[in-house]
Image (cartoon, rainbow, N blue to C red):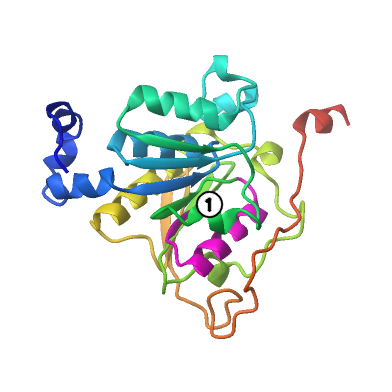
């Protein structure tokens, strides 16, 4: 593709990188990435991918902006409260970079729509905050042969890994979702706002590395960190032959909607 003079200036810091250059920027500009969730993780992911010039960014989220989101979900502003998150995110991306085609899905990702939605994308980013959807994303991507970035945050902690076909998937590490309410959510236990940015930018970097083919992805590795101590740790993983979705004898061959814990912080305060 031929970049305009303005585009060459906009992406000049990428083009100057020996490992990226014009060819790498073309790959980014031709890339199609789906961000699942426009919240704490999805916000920095979508913003940085848009700034980088990813050609098509899909955003799926069925929620609206709440005042409590603004402590960490940096793509939404005060005037966006009660606005659908996907619309708010699309507006900011369009203002940041008109080169980007933003496709919005104002709905939840479910077992019924997941495979159809991810079909058109090169890479999927898990920016969700609950285990049922994380397992749904994993299973859909494994079944469809799609690479994705997993991310999770809570309190001061974050963890992430990248999956490409043939490497360890999320279920290789975590066999099945925990029982509802066994593990607190961010709305129950809290999260330091900047932790969302720390992990989201790592996921964005993994996405750009995948699109350009530069560097080593977080495949067969689980990266975790604690922002209190700034300790980062990487644990090696490997595909499990007993994995229920990517193992030798898979038992998960269709997508499942697991029960999702619901937390209303206002109701909890009343009680």
Residue 57 location, x and y as percent? 41, 41
Classify residue 22 as left or right of residue 76: left
Residue 212 location, x and y as percent? 24, 53
Q: Is residue 28 visible?
A: yes
Along the line of sight, the residue nearer the viewer: 169 or 72? 169
Under circle 1, the secondary element is helix
Quadrant occupied by the C terminus = top right
Q: Quadrant of residue 197?
A: top left
Quadrant occupied by the N terminus = top left
Taking the spot 61% from the left edge, 23% from the top edge, the residue there is: 83
Classify residue 47 as left or right of residue 179: left
Taking the spot 59% from the left edge, 41% from the top edge, the residue there is: 155
Along the line of sight, the residue nearer the viewer: 233 or 75? 75
Residue 13 location, x and y as percent? 16, 36
Classify residue 216 as left or right of residue 33: left
Residue that sits furthest to the right in the current view? 271
Please tell me whether residue 137 is drawn above or below residue 188 in the rendered image: below
Residue 146 location, x and y as percent? 44, 62
Is residue 208 found inside the magenta-colored segment of the image? no
Q: Which residues are magenta?
A: 129-149
Classify residue 82 as left or right of residue 92: right
Judging by the rendered image, the residue that carries numbered circle 1 is: 117
User: Magenta-highlighted stretch: main secondary structure?
Assistant: helix
Is residue 139 found inside the magenta-colored segment of the image? yes
Please tell me whether residue 162 is drawn above or below residue 171 in the rendered image: above
């Amino acid at each position: 593709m031929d970049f305009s003079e303005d585009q060459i200036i906009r992406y000049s810091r990428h083009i100057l990188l020996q490992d990226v250059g014009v060819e790498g920027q073309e790959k980014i500009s031709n890339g199609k990435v789906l961000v699942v969730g426009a919240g704490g993780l999805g916000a920095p992911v979508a913003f940085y991918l848009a700034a980088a010039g990813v050609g098509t960014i899909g955003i799926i989220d069925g929620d609206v902006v709440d005042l409590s989101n603004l402590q960490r979900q940096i793509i939404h502003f005060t005037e966006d409260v009660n606005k659908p998150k996907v619309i708010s995110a699309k507006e900011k991306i369009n203002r940041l970079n008109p080169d980007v085609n933003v496709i919005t899905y104002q709905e939840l990702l479910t077992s019924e729509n997941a495979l159809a939605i991810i079909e058109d994308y090169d890479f999927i980013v898990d920016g969700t905050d609950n285990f049922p959807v994380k397992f749904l994303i994993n299973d859909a991507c494994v079944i469809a042969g799609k690479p994705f970035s997993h991310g999770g945050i809570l309190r001061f902690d974050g963890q992430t890994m990248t999956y490409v076909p043939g490497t360890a998937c999320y279920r290789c590490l975590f066999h099945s979702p925990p029982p509802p309410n066994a593990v607190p959510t961010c709305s129950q236990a809290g999260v330091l706002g900047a932790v969302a940015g720390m992990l989201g930018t790592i996921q964005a970097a993994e996405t750009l590395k995948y699109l350009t083919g530069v560097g080593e992805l977080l495949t067969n590795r689980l990266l975790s960190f604690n922002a209190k101590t700034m300790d980062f740790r990487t644990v090696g993983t490997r595909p499990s032959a007993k994995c229920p979705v990517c193992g030798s004898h898979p038992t998960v061959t269709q997508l499942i909607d697991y029960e999702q814990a619901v937390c209303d912080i206002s109701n909890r305060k009343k009680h």
